[in-house]
């Protein structure tokens, strides 16, 4: 009889259960969200993940999204995501290193006891080939292989590429392209306003009792800053660099565009009408600003004064 390993995590207000044929390394970021103590009467998981030692399924269905790291296919049975083998790509081969299958129903024989009877849960299979590198049998690899931002989106939660800080106003999420200054502004708020940096790269956004909240996630890019948190959002701030500071409150299409340009996990044709409704709601409810700023305390003062003025 095969040995199975069980893991349970909670983040963004959702419970993720993993039943695995491989013993997975729980990294420091994932450990912050690991439920090591739970009872049989704990609430049912929102997502059940079965990790199997098996060759990845062959690609089938319509290719709806592709980048340098993975390909996403859709068929009548759901989605298949192939994580690409980078070493093979360098040799000119497009080979799947592992794959995940989701969006369809899994059989009861496939799932563990704790994952049965979930009507509204996300049911996901992850396939690890026999030659999969043992050093990569880890939680970070699982989160990437299932395209975690995409899965959260199915539960009404989107992931924002942002540096998040906790302030007396609530959570401020600094967004923008890589190198624009997200970490710089977060560190300036830490130095000038004693703000707590929550995550240096990504956070989740959803609604709790009708209010928009920011949530911690089990990864943080290269920033090394990752905390488990749930906080009301004070503002989403789209950054630009400039010799002088100026700030504009965005609304309508401009607010929606500024927010959506920083959302992670939007996979082309896989986006649904319900997702669009979520984005419109967030753009209406969350104060969204465009801040062209300097890399010093003047930018902090301007944003602080704007938030104090309730603009």
Image (tube, grey):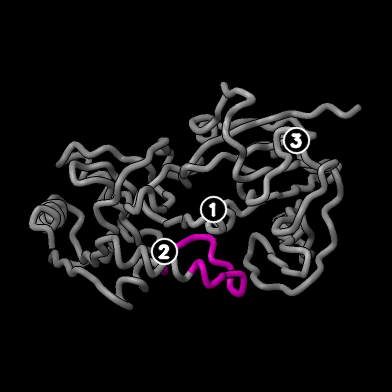
Q: Which residue is mark 2?
A: 262
Locate residue 188, reporting x and y percent: 21, 46
Apparent side of residue 300 relative to residue 127 in the rendered image (left or right)? left
Of residues 160 and 67, which is closer to you in this image? 160
Position of the C terminus, as image quadrant, is bottom left
Disc with the residue nearer the chain's start (1 vs 2): 1
Q: Quadrant of residue 133?
A: top right
Residue at 38% over, 48% down: 208
Q: Residues within 10 Å of mark 1 (few under 14, many from 20)?
A: many
**Mark in the foreground, 1 or 2:** 1
Image vertical order of residue 214 relative to residue 92, above or below: above
Assign a secondary structure to mark 3.
strand
Q: Quadrant of residue 190?
A: top left
Q: How many marks?
A: 3
Magenta-drawn segment: 260-275
Q: Which residue is mark 1?
A: 152
Q: Which residue is mark 3?
A: 20
Q: Residues within 10 Å of mark 3 (few under 14, many from 20)?
A: many
Apparent side of residue 305 relative to residue 201 in the rendered image (left or right)? left
């Amino acid at each position: 009889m095969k040995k199975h390993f069980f893991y349970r995590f909670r983040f963004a207000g959702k419970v993720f259960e993993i039943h695995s044929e491989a013993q997975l390394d729980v990294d420091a970021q994932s450990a912050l969200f690991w439920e090591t103590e739970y009872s049989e009467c704990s609430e049912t998981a929102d997502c059940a993940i079965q990790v199997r030692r098996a060759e990845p399924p062959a690609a089938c269905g319509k290719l709806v999204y592709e980048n340098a790291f993975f390909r996403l296919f859709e068929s009548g049975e759901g989605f298949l995501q192939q994580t690409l083998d980078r070493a093979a790509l360098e040799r000119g081969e497009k080979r799947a290193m592992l794959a995940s299958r989701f969006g369809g129903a899994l059989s009861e024989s496939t799932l563990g006891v704790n994952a049965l009877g979930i009507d509204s849960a996300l049911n996901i299979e992850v396939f690890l080939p026999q030659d999969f590198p043992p050093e990569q049998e880890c939680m970070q690899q699982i989160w990437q292989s299932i395209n975690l931002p995409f899965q959260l989106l199915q539960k009404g939660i989107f992931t924002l590429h942002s540096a998040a800080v906790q302030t007396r106003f609530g959570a401020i999420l600094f967004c923008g392209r890589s190198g624009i200054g997200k970490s710089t502004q977060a560190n300036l708020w830490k130095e000038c306003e004693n703000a707590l940096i929550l995550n240096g790269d990504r956070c989740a956004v959803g609604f709790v009792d009708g209010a928009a909240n920011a949530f911690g996630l089990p990864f943080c890019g290269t920033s090394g800053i990752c905390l488990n948190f749930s906080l009301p959002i004070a503002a989403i701030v789209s950054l630009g660099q400039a010799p002088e500071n100026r700030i504009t409150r965005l609304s309508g299409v401009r607010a929606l565009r500024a927010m959506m340009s920083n959302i992670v996990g939007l996979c082309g044709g896989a986006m649904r009408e319900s997702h669009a409704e979520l984005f419109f709601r967030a753009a209406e409810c969350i104060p969204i600003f465009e801040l062209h700023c300097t890399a010093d305390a003047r930018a902090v003062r301007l944003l602080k004064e704007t938030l104090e003025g309730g603009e």
